[in-house]
DNA sequence: AAAACTACCGAAAGGCTTTTCAGCAAGATA
DNA sequence: TATCTTGCTGAAAAGCCTTTCGGTAGTTTT
């Protein structure tokens, strides 16, 4: 590589450049480009060709100056490493429509000070709204109600019921997992989940036990096995479970990671999946679910949909239609080989 | 949830609000807040207190107006789902310093039209520079040299040598993997890699074979086994390998995903890791590497560092210090249980 | 009393688009 | 030919907020 003096970079063409090139006034050029009437067809053509030639596009900043809007939103997260933020972000980007709105991305990395810093930076850039993605499903502190722009909380709700939060219904997700297993003929269903301090773990467990009770079935292993969100806990818990309840014919794992550990332990014991024991996870994380042997059935939390809805609600709030409270979305089971025989 | 009329949102305080509250002119308020002299200490205090009370912070847009810079950069990626962009993004965000610079994130999803769209949107927002994250290590088409702002390509280099690209040295990464295995006493080293159409696969393979040749060792299995970047290929290739070269004592897997498949197949055959066969992967993807049994030694491609350097180079280019060509970074081996006995 | 400060203020610049309104030309009608 | 339309065009203002420049009081020093 090498260094040298900056080459003369082409300046971006402004409207006045186009007007000059087309031999008309700025006002006429603006009208021609925006499809206003009161411009002769021939003149309009000339302007459009000039704009094309100079590869002109309007300055969004100047436009925002008039409109009183910048066409930007801030997305605040603490979970960039994790797998929640990204799908949500994609869904939101989707809903905004490419180019119409631009997204400032900020990762606070779990630090409240840094978060405050980012909020300030975003407000100083005059974003039209904020989306806050929680780092877990647990409720988080509100950014406060005295912000000059609307805020939508996603994945993890705000503690303040006056805020609007969009979340996945985890109780229902647990219920769906069990319903799927029952529908595929399972009767001795166990549940190995993650850290009990996470509401996601507790909610899914509630859904699982409720669905079992309603079906008149016991929980195999008697208790929900809470532990941590790791493969190794999945492995260890499975070994314990098989000792305690060797007739188990299905395991609801609290996450795809745990499910991978469960499957690993089952392979180790030469237990056939799904013939002897079926396994279902949560998250539908492609890397884990589609690479296991057999592929893993998993409850998809529809994070993109969450992001899309959040963006939509933010738009509405920007237009004055402000909502409050918690809005929850249903997840859906993605069936693969770990619960249904492949032939 | 419920909808209602928009509550009167507090307007963000401007400098003139502060000046009025402190009973001074706008000019004096500005000087006081920016630590300029020519302001009496008592007056400065009054202004600072007023600013505090109104929770004033300067408008970045107006500031940029004067400075001729917006303090924003665009980050263009096609791999948000994947694991490359995120660490790079984090590194870049890090280097820019929280609040000083804000990042517009755009995902083109592999679509050239959409990418062009995003570039235009970013330029219309007057970003000070662009970072382009490749979706693979393969060279990608340049955005062109006629852009009004500097561009830095990361992970995947630009095809145009006049652009500046920052990449990982994958040949060296392959060499390091082998050096590590040799240092831990291995002599019959095989290499199972991913899709041969990826330069990452070819480069790492080149590094592996070069290092082996230099050490006077053969490649176990005779050929590099190219396939796909999946666990199932790792499993299948391992079975083939053990038939063809049963005395193999170490496997360099082309990625952590492949490595997981390799380990899975070894477990199946009751081969001890690392006693009988050591395994090393690439990417150091925590979710995969730290959850395997034993934990996986992996070559860390230092993506954060890549992002950090890209941001730094972008800064330099914004100041007129433009570089060209390809700058490559060395990776480093993160040692875990799959290559070294845990006791 | 003149010169040299200090502390402060008013005004303008800095960026670009959109819109408004007045004006000008060419064609149509009396 | 004079007047009236009609159809376009262009100059200028508005939209936002900070910083800086030049200037004016008032106060201190020589």
Image (cartoon, coloured by chain):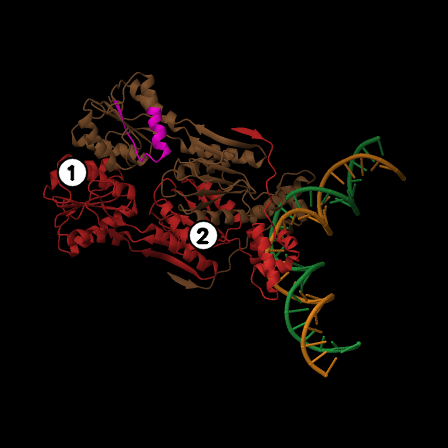
Chain colours: A red, B brown, C orange, D green
Frontmost residue, B297 versus C29: C29
Query: Is label 1 in a helix, a strand or a loop?
Result: helix
The front one of B163 and A81 is B163
Look at the image and tell me whether residue B57 can be seen.
no
Range of residues picked out in magenta: B189-208
Q: Is residue B60 left or right of residue B254?
A: right
Query: Which residue is found at the position 19% from the left and 22% from the top?
Result: B247
Residue beneath label 1, please? A266
Q: Nearer the viewer, mark 2 or mark 1?
A: 2
Instruction: Using residue D4 as the reference point, say whether residue B128 is left or right of it.
Output: left
Residue identifier under label 2? A98
Q: Nearer the viewer, residue A251 or A33?
A: A33
**Residue B47 pos. (x, y %):** 63, 45
What chain does mark 1 sit on?
A
Which label sits on residue A184? none
Measured Cα–Cα span from mark 2 to mark 1: 46 Å
Which chain is home to disc 2? A
């Amino acid at each position: 590589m090498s260094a040298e003096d900056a080459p003369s970079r082409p300046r971006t063409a402004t409207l006045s450049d186009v007007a000059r090139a087309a031999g008309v006034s700025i006002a006429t050029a603006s009208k021609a480009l925006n499809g206003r009437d009161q411009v002769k067809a021939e003149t309009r053509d000339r302007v459009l060709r000039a704009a094309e030639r100079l590869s002109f596009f309007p300055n969004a900043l100047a436009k925002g100056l008039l409109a009183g809007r910048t066409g930007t939103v801030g997305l605040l997260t603490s979970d960039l490493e994790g797998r929640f933020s990204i799908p949500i972000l994609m869904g939101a980007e989707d809903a905004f429509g490419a180019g119409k709105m631009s997204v400032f991305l900020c990762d606070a990395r779990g630090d409240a000070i840094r978060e405050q810093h980012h909020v300030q930076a975003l407000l100083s850039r005059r974003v039209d709204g904020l989306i806050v993605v929680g780092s877990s499903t647990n409720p988080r502190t509100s950014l406060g109600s005295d912000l000059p722009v609307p805020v939508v909380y996603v994945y993890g709700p705000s503690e303040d019921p006056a805020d609007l939060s969009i979340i996945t219904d985890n109780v229902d997700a647990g219920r769906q997992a069990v319903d799927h297993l029952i529908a595929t003929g399972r009767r001795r269903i166990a549940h190995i989940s993650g850290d009990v301090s996470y509401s996601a773990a507790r909610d899914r467990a509630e859904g699982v036990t409720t669905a079992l009770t309603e079906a008149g079935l016991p929980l195999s292993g008697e208790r929900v096995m809470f532990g941590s969100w790791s493969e190794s806990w999945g492995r260890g818990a499975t070994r314990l479970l098989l000792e305690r309840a060797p007739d188990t014919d299905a395991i609801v794992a609290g996450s795809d990671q745990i499910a991978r550990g469960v499957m690993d332990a089952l392979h180790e014991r030469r237990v056939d999946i799904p013939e002897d024991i079926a396994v279902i996870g949560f998250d539908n994380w492609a890397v884990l679910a589609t690479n296991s042997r057999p592929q893993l059935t998993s409850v998809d939390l529809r994070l993109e949909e969450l992001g899309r809805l959040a963006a939509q609600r933010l738009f509405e709030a920007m237009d004055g239609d402000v909502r409050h409270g918690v809005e929850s979305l249903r997840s859906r089971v993605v069936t693969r080989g770990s619960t249904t025989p492949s032939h």
